Image (spheres, rainbow, N blue to C red):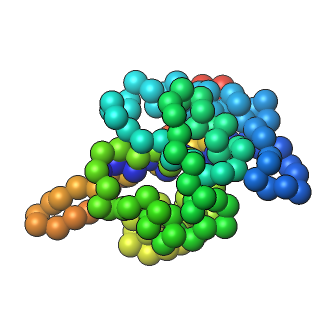
Amino acid sequence: MDLILWRHAEAEDGSDDLARALTRKGQQQAGAMAAWLRPHLPDGYRLLVSEARRSRQTGAVLGKHAEVIPAINPGASAAEVLSAIGWPEATGTLVLVGHQPYIGQVASLLLADAEQDWSVKKGAVWWIQNRERNGGEESVLKVMMTPGMVGDAE
């Protein structure tokens, strides 16, 4: 299984956290990352987004129907996120558009076997692959990409 952790792009400030929309820069960040992701994603991947408007807007630029999962809303823990998406039992490729701090915490838990507060830039993706090796399972970092690495969106 491949898990692509995609932090939502830059959003407006506001008191209603779930209603915050992407800024113009955020739209550019999401567009740049989606343009890079599209040719690299396998057919049949699943797109998972939180209920937050900024998460749904970020994922929407891929042009694929997204599954809205309240369990990955802002404030979720790494364990809650992994449980909600069925890691590592799920098959195929999942693109999860979510939030800090859990994006960094999930990445650190899967890659370093310890939940830490890793910083993840807005609009960035961490592509983690779960594979079998030497009779056991391991998670490896396949790609880490920021919007600035794929265009002038940073």
Above or below, 140 against 127 in this view is below
Q: Residue at x 11, y 66 (%)?
A: 135
Please count the marks in the image: 0
Q: Please state which of residues 72 and 2 is positioned toward the viewer in this rendering.
A: 72
Q: Please state which of residues 53 and 117 is positioned toward the viewer in this rendering.
A: 53
Looking at the image, residue 5 sits to the left or right of residue 141; the answer is: right
Q: Quick check: can you spot residue 65?
A: yes
Looking at the image, residue 85 sits to the left or right of residue 26; the answer is: left
Q: Residue at x 11, y 64 (%)?
A: 134
Give the residue furthest to the right: 15
- Measuring from the top left, give residue 62's x and y in whole percent: 53, 29
- Measuring from the top left, give residue 109's x and y in whole percent: 44, 69
Viewport quadrant of the C terminus: top right
Above or below, 99 against 30 in this view is below
Give the residue furthest to the bottom: 114
Q: Residue at x 78, y 41 (%)?
A: 21
- Measuring from the top left, give residue 83's x and y in whole percent: 44, 67
Looking at the image, residue 68 sits to the left or right of residue 20; the answer is: left
